[in-house]
Image (cartoon, grey):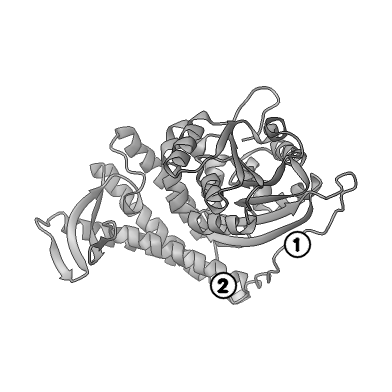
Amino acid sequence: MTRSASRPEFTPALGHHGLTGLYDDVIALMTRERVWRSALVDQLTPREGETIVDVGCGTGTLATLIKAAAPGADVIGIDPDPEVLDRARSKASIRGAKVDFLRGFAGDVSDLIGQGRADKIVSSLVFHQVPIVSKRAGLAAIYAALRPGGELHVADYGWQRTPPMRLLFRQVQALDGVENTRLNAAGGLPDLIAEAGFEGVEERAVIATATGSISLYRAAKPRDPASPTRQEIAMPQLISPQPLSTARQSDGRRIRLAAVALAIVVTGVDQLAKAWALTLTAPVEVAPFLNLALGFNRGVTFGLLSSDSDAGRWFLVALTAAVAAAVLTAAWRTRHRRIALALGAIAGGALGNIVDRIRQGAVTDFIDFHLGDWRWPTFNLADAAIVCGVAALLWTSMKRRKGTT
């Protein structure tokens, strides 16, 4: 998202121009977007009359939320991608939010709005995807654009502290590149922010998601920029995971085999259940809130990212296969029983849906859960295994952060 010295380049939404239309759905599904965006707006505390700049504004979701929280604020969104800016303007118009959207890179911020003009600058899911040189250039331009005492607020992938979060973050690295994302995953972004001259750099929150942990950072430009005071970076206090005992290490082979066996069982049971579902000629009521009804899904879990094109079908096959391979590799390497079994469930669910997509171009769904007029998207046993596996990983990660495992 920051400027190249030789020519203007940027990383498009989801890493490819053809996927821009899926961006909002993917972010909502994979990053617990409502949680971290709400926390970021609360941390930002936008006020009437302030000039607030959203760097790397994307499709304008955050900018419109800021405008809704402080209608009298002057909100500016900046992004180099003209396609997402068109979507941002449309979204702001629909929501009745007056936001100025400008085309530019992070390194252009001070040129676009003027030096020392912004009261607050916010950025979300931008810095992890650009090279370290561009990270530094963007932070320097942001520093120049802020008034003395102005604040920087960042939500981005940060230090991936636990094995489950490091594993899940590999999905992001596969999309945005290992080299660009390595510094964020190692916890180095706060150091770069401090290096740019900001003071009081702190990590305010860490939010576990299905793609790794997202950190919320806050920093301020010194009120006397001529003599900035470097302060120690404040990080949340964590308890380091305890080393594995010799007995648990020796049990590694059985743990790995259990993970693989679970993946095979999940795939097999899922395929048997779907074979039976294909024989359904009419919905079967199991309970007042549960029906068994045959359906087909050309997207991923719960019908998201649906595509009727043949190219879309094979893109989803390739994407799901890559994720399944990464998950199985991690399951084979880990010596944590709970993590290995969770990964086995995820891999089995992914493989079960891959078989459907290759064989018939769509995934067979048949579990119809509803309460009154409200209905959950129809799903299958593979979907349930994936959701349960991800939930187990998040739960394990949170317990490890509290030092209870």
**Is residue 322 visible to us here?**
no
Which label sits in the foreground, 2 or 1? 1
The x and y percentages for residue 258 are: 43, 67
The x and y percentages for residue 18 are: 43, 32
Badge 2: how crowded within 10 Å, few (<14), some, or many (20+)?
few
For this rendering, which residue is in front, 185 or 71? 71
**Is residue 124 visible to us here?**
yes
- Classify the position of the C terminus by image quarter: bottom right
Residue at image coords 61%, 69%: 401
The Cα–Cα distance between marks 2 and 1, rounded to whole angstroms, is 22 Å
Task: Find numbered disc 2 in the image and state the secondary structure of the residue it sits on.
Answer: helix
Q: Determine the image quadrant of residue 291.
A: bottom left
The x and y percentages for residue 386 are: 39, 59
Residue labelled with disc 2: 399
- Give the mark nearer the N terminus: 2 vs 1: 1
Residue positioned most to the top: 6
Residue positioned most to the right: 227
What's the residue type where badge 1 is placed?
Ala
Q: Are marks 2 and 1 in contact (CB under 8 Å)?
A: no
- Classify the position of the N terminus by image quarter: top right
The x and y percentages for residue 293 are: 17, 58
Q: Which mark is residue 317?
A: none
Residue labelled with disc 1: 234
What's the residue type where badge 2 is placed?
Lys
Residue 384 versus residue 95 in the image, above or below: below
Task: Find numbered disc 1 in the image and state the secondary structure of the residue it sits on.
Answer: loop
For this rendering, which residue is in front, 195 or 324? 195
Badge 1: how crowded within 10 Å, few (<14), some, or many (20+)?
some
In the rendered picture of this protein, how many numbered marks are placed on residues? 2
Residue 46 versus residue 259 in the image, above or below: above
For this rendering, which residue is in front, 385 or 128? 128
